Amino acid sequence: MGRKEENIRKAQALMHKVKFIRNIGTAAHIDHGKTTLSDNLIAGAGMMSEELAGKQLLLDYDEQEQARGITINAANASMVHEYGGSEYLINLIDTPGHVDFGGDVTRAMRAIDGVIILVCAVEGVMPQTETVIRQAMKEKVKPVLFINKVDRLINELRVDAEEMQNRFLKIIAEVNERIKKLAPEEFKEEWMVKVEDGSVAFGSAFYNWAISAPFMKRSGITFKDAYDYCAKEDQKTLAKVAPIHQILLDMTVRHMPNPVEAQRIRVPQIWHGDLDSDIGKAMYNCKMDGPVAFMVTKIIMDPHAGEISVGRLFSGKMKKGQILYIVGMPNPNRVQTVALSVGADRITVDEIDAGNIVCASGLKDAVAGSTVSSLEDMDAFERIVHYSEPVVTVAIEAKHTKDLPKLVEVLRIISKADPSIQVEINQETGEHLLSGMGELHLEITEYRIVHDHGVDITSSEPIVVYRESTEGKGGAFEGKSPNKHNRFYLEVEPLEEEVLKAILDGEIQSGGKIKHAKELARQLQDMGWDKKEAKNVSHIHNTNMFVNATSGIQYLHETIELCNDAFVEAMEKGPLGQERCQGVKVKLVDAKLHEDSIHRGPAQVIPAVRSAIYGAMCQAGRLLLEPKQKVFINVPQDLLGNAVKEMQTRRAVIEDMSQEEEMANIEAKAPVAEMFGFATAIRSATTGRALWSTENSGFEKLPKDLQPDVVRQIRIRKGLKPEPYDERYYAA
């Protein structure tokens, strides 16, 4: 039996021993070495050839990933590692670092209990490093630190041992500062990483070696030895005496919690149901004999097996042939196969226990983010909060009319597998609108439609997604129903900053009816709302709130659902350019309703309420918000002027500039609309010597002088009249 087969056999035995399981991920800024590290861990565990490790990029099995040299999908693999005389099953998820694929990182965090944060020894802590730490802390995932590319300090930068240690101390201090700032209160001190307890390791994923304090103590190999091996360019020998998988997997087993310990910390954070219910207790204690509670974090399309749902099993056993319910879906689904992942291979098994990362086929109604259970009425897991929203759109069409039905099906599959992609069909023009996190995200998605699914498409130039809001207070504005028998009076105003932030951070649940009204009322009162208003929030849609501020109006309780529907319609398509609204508070302050329900149906109520909201927004002063990106540029001193000039031509605001030896760092904020083609421009401005990265930073007001032109462009593109309604807006 080969080593790989032996390990697969062991993995199948260990998946039932929950104390000997560790679910971990890698997370870091783009190009800091996550996939190379993951490869070497898998090779060390005997799951692939060691010669190919770091070169084969087993987890980047998507050909686009290999062509671009980046990770796009979060891939997962299981391996067996011996530590302290016992064997452990380690389920590993390798995540992307590029900002456009941040949604994948957030979803992967839901499945794991511990994360190896990688930081490049040369570049240090970068913006995306902070983002991944924030995501881990929000999901209560415990971090350890690996400082990678140490060989480059020695061989390229010729740094001496003392200078090297100073660099390490600086990186550790910066990582700890972020952990302390972002960690849950009870773990601020406990989760900080320290060299002495072995929660920090140093090494080179590419050359396959690493060292940590416990390893140095045990083996007698010192930091100076490692330095000498690198200086002599003999990293092959170093990799034999200090193999990376040994040091990092030891660190994982020692510092990461097993699923039982982890779920006690994490379940109250990610599931807000009743912890004293059967399913609550089963998840809290990671029980195998409890009801099934499975969270789908990813959908993989397999050409042979169809849709595979990958995710974390928090309680119960998952078996072939089992009938399971997907929360929010009407029909049960039958599990066809269950499997463990090893890179691109899936090993089919009869059943898998709680605490594992599972691949299941047959859950056809599941999407990434679904809650799956053997109970019909399980409370869903908390919505996964993505730190950025789609900001760029392309319109795509099938090249050949005969491919149209296939394209519709492919887009359905793609939006299931990647919830960060939004698909919309423009009914007027028949175009399919694809919205994503950035240019690269959309390029990759288009590539998949053509190459993986075989549909030829044509696509438009990328278009930026805007949001609409209001400047001040407007209303009360009267909306009459078409039959003139019902009147609604509405006011609008901007939603308070603190409340908007709470919705964006997921502290206040958006998405429809109010489930926990008392809890919401208490939160809003703490943020300065008066008691009556806080109690009467009727609906939250995206980042907008609808408040029923009336009292004692006859028949309103029968009509309020239709008012909510009208509010959702108005917030989905604002009065300026039919873009979504953000941060708008809408109040129903009065209504006069016909006593006969026949005269106050949807066709009467919805247009009346919608036009009253639009009218009040016109009176309040309509605003267009544009998406912004933070841009971080690292450039040699002598080219600093060129880089700054390039940013200034793009309406960017330079927020910070700093110097480190011969390099300068620029931190700027620029509108997404001005960032198209930036990669080519910054390369030519700095003769290819600038390193840069971006991070989405939400929506901000578009400058007043640009608003009329941008609105006109949006309206023409959508086939609307070029000018929006004027301030006297009468739609009835």
Image (cartoon, rainbow, N blue to C red):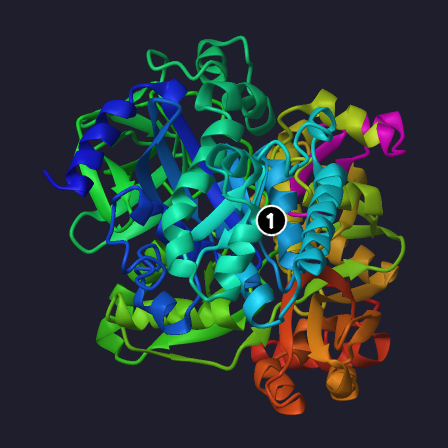
- Circle 1 is placed at which residue position? 132
134 in relation to 19, above or below: below
**What is the x, y in percent for residue 111?**
45, 36
Is residue 256 depicted above or below 615 in this figure? above
**Nearer to me, 680 or 426:** 680
Queried whether the magenta region covers residue 546, the answer comes back as yes
Residue 295 as seen in the image, left or right of residue 385: left
Question: Residue, x 44% and y 52% (percent of image)?
Answer: 209
Q: In terms of depth relative to the viewer, which is nearer, 328 or 696?
A: 696
Q: Please state, as top left, top right, bottom left or bottom right, where the C terminus lies in the image.
A: bottom right
Q: Amino acid at mark 1?
A: Val
Q: Residues within 10 Å of mark 1 (few under 14, many from 20)?
A: many
Q: Position of residue 449 (x, y in %)?
A: 32, 68
Residue 6 versus residue 725: which sits nearer the camera?
6
Q: Which residues are magenta?
A: 526-555
Q: Is residue 721 visible?
A: no
* 4 relative to 472 in the view: left or right: left
In the image, is 71 to the left or to the right of 718? left
Circle 1 sits in a helix, a strand or a loop, which is it?
helix
Residue drawn at x 40%, y 19% as measured from the top left: 19
Please state the horizontal and vertical placement of residue 695, each as a whole percent of the image. 65, 62
> Image point 37% across, 59% down: which residue?
236
Q: Position of residue 714 (x, y in %)?
A: 64, 76
Answer yes or no: is residue 569 visible: yes
Q: Is residue 444 magenta?
A: no
- Quadrant hosting residue 553: top right
> Looking at the rendering, in which quadrant would you find the N terminus?
top left
Q: Residue at left 68%, top 32%? A: 595
